Amino acid sequence: STFLRVMRSSVVKAAGRALVQRTPKHKHARTFIAPVYNFAKRIMPKISDTERAALESGTIAFDKDLFSGDPSLKEICQKYKPVLTAEEQSFLNNEVEVLCEMLDGHQIDKDQNLSPKVWQYIRENKFMGMVIPKHFGGKGFGAHAHAKVVEKIAGRSLACAVTVMVPNSLGPGELLHHYGTPEQKAYYLPRLAHGIDIPCFGLTGPTNGSDAASMRDEGVVCMENGVLGMRVTFNKRYITLAPVATVVGLAFRLSDPNKLLTKGKEGITVALLPTEKNQFAPNGLPGLKIGNRHDPLGAAFMNGTVQSESMFVPMSCVIGGEERTGFGWNMLMECLGEGRGISLPALGLASSRLAVLGVGGYARVRKQFKVPIAAMEGIQEKLAIIGANTFTIAAAQSFFDAILADKQKPPVLSAIMKLHCTERGRQSVNESMDIIGGAGISKGPSNFMASGYVGMPIAITVEGANVLTRSLISFGQGLNRSHPHLLGLIESIRKGNDMAGFNRELTNILRHCGTNLARSLGRFWAVQLKSKSDVSAYY
């Protein structure tokens, strides 16, 4: 063991020295580096302000350890331990349990709505205010409690889980808490926590889905009757809770052709639009139209459109006031990114856990050819996939929630969580439908998998379609943010005249590759000598 450590260290140092020696000094490197640098500048696409905000948002967590080539499993286990407080555990054991007993998934699907009693119970017990701090009347729960509550409810009803999930992850509560004016916080947060106001958030439109920054919704700064405000035109669709919302979070592009702004700037802005008069919109917003309800594959949660044509909105409705105009994209990237890694993975885990319990039990009692189908190898293969997916999603959930509890906001890991947990959840549901056969495709009170089967494509699509999340965030943003030297290389190219920086970062990348290659070879041989009986140490 000691010999191998010495050998690995020697190999790593030798590789690093060799790369440094082979890399020319900057004075002589110009002849070789200049053509490469000029070529890189030609092929490098321009990074817009919104793209730059996305690249620079949040923090880097365990993902940087992966790219360092030297991650520590021991450090992960010691540092990241998700826990529920006594209050959070009590809420799960009592209020959430009561809510689940009230839910009849089949009846909810037939009615296409939750019952009035369920709506009342959700509001009275602050299910919509789980993440709002206690001093504003909320529960003040952490990410792990948020995830476990959504997961448990989703095992009974997707529609109810989404109803609880959205105000705690996609609603304006988080934005208000971090960026709202004192007056906005004092007014809205208690109302949201107690369910007096039901929020929705309008981001997606006919021309912008996963590419949220390409929105065409516009606001023009104006002065009317001595009140500074905006004339806003927007058309939002696929907005969850819109049909029942009393306050609408809205993202739009703001322009100021007459230079009326004394603070803030032009650009993407986020405002909060009440459906009735209040202190921020004393005359109301008569042009605000809550449109037709969508039918998301028959799922019973509320979803619809929000529209307006040249509606006057007072500047006091902007979250954070006039000084926060133009900063909406940064606000969205910082706050809403982490919710993507909590709620939707919880839905994937709920579907996968339900498959383990329900389908696993079904396979034990269902007999064909005089034997339980669980004894058949084909069924066992599918049950193994379901079990492995459930274990993997649960482990990922605990890990990610612990990272959030450590006050980190990793947008790349959040996207990876959403991508892989929903994909594994979908696979588990599909394998389950193969096992239960006709019992799965005939809807009725005893069909426990149909709701998950219908709902998983929705989870795959929302908050950035998985196919684009994989390409743009997991690989694109993930590589740029997590690699120790790549972002510096890109920055040197963007400057256009930083050949020294380009040379430095390119040298660092080559050295990094060589070091990791040597480390990988050394550890490969070291692992061969380890005992395979100690599974944790082996991996």
Image (spheres, helix red, strand yellow):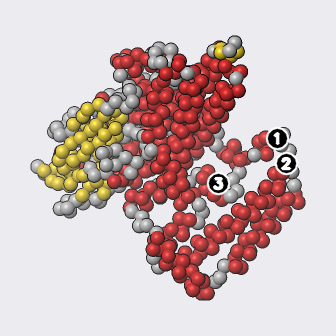
Q: Is residue 280 above or below residue 23?
A: above
- Left or right: residue 95 compared with residue 32: left
Give the x, y percent position of residue 139. 46, 31
Q: Is residue 187 above or below residue 92?
A: below
The local crowd at label 1, few if under 14, some if 14 to 19, many if 20 or more residues have their Cα within 10 Å, is few
The total number of labels drawn is 3
Give the x, y percent position of residue 492. 50, 73
Could you tell me how far apart the alpha carbons at marks 1 and 2 are, in whole angstroms? 8 Å
**For the residue marked with disc 3, what is the amino acid?**
Leu
Q: Of residues 64 and 431, which is closer to you in this image?
A: 431
- Residue, disc 1: 534
The local crowd at label 2, few if under 14, some if 14 to 19, many if 20 or more residues have their Cα within 10 Å, is few
The quarter holding residue 399 reads top right
Q: Please report the residue visible at 54 percent of the width from the left and 69 percent of the height from the top.
A: 489
Secondary structure of the residue carrying tag 2 is loop
- Residue, disc 2: 530
Looking at the image, tell me whether mark 3 or mark 1 is earlier in sequence order: 3
Q: Residue furthest left?
A: 225
Could you tell me how far apart the alpha carbons at marks 3 and 2 are, in whole angstroms? 22 Å
Give the x, y percent position of residue 437. 55, 21
- Left or right: residue 85 compared with residue 468: right
Q: Is residue 138 visible?
A: no
- Left or right: residue 248 compared with residue 89: left
Q: Which mark is residue 66?
A: 3
Q: Of residues 344 and 271, which is closer to you in this image?
A: 344
